[in-house]
Image (cartoon, rainbow, N blue to C red):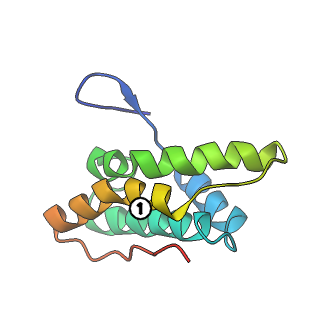
Amino acid sequence: MLGDRAGGAVKFMNDAEVDEHVRRFSSHPVLGPAARTLSNLRNWADRNSDGWAYWPKPARSAAKLMELIDRESEHYWRGNAVNATPAEYRRALAPIKAFRTRQGADFLIEEAL
């Protein structure tokens, strides 16, 4: 977890968690692009800073995306339907797109099918 400005905790996924979500949801029309986008952001942060685990801004921008992926992962493990919608994904992407613009970053944001 990372701290946010109000002192609360922000969700953080380590490298293994990100990679597992990429594998788990590779064929899902919403969570596949969501997990790959998170991986792309993580990889960009690793190439352009001390790394994903040490630079909090990229993870903060992806907090809503990580929460969406985590929520749906819980459904997956419980054997329930994974119901993430393209609209939820678009909302989770808004802070990531803002981060990408502010940083002049070139990582790929995948669109939901």
Report whether 85 appears left or right of 100.
right
Judging by the rendered image, the residue that carries numbered circle 1 is 90
Q: Amino acid at mark 1?
A: Arg
Residue drawn at the location 23% of the way across and 71% of the way down: 105
SS of the residue at dot 1?
helix
Q: Nearer the viewer, residue 61 or 94?
A: 94
Q: Could you tell me residue 20's position as x and y percent?
A: 66, 59
**Image quadrant containing the N terminus:** top left
Which residue is drawn at the image coordinates 70% and 74% (left, top)? 27
Q: Which residue is located at x 38 percent, y 77 percent?
A: 108
Determine the residue positioned at 67% across, 69% down.
28
Please indicate whether residue 24 sits to the left or right of residue 61 in the image: right
Expressed as whole percent of the image width and height from the top left, the position of residue 43 reads 41, 67
Relative depth, front residue between 21 and 49: 21
The count of marks equals 1
| Quarter of the image where one finds residue 32 | bottom right
Residue 81 lies, with reference to residue 4, above or below; the image says below
Residue 35: % across, % down: 55, 63
Q: Position of residue 26 (x, y in %)?
A: 67, 72
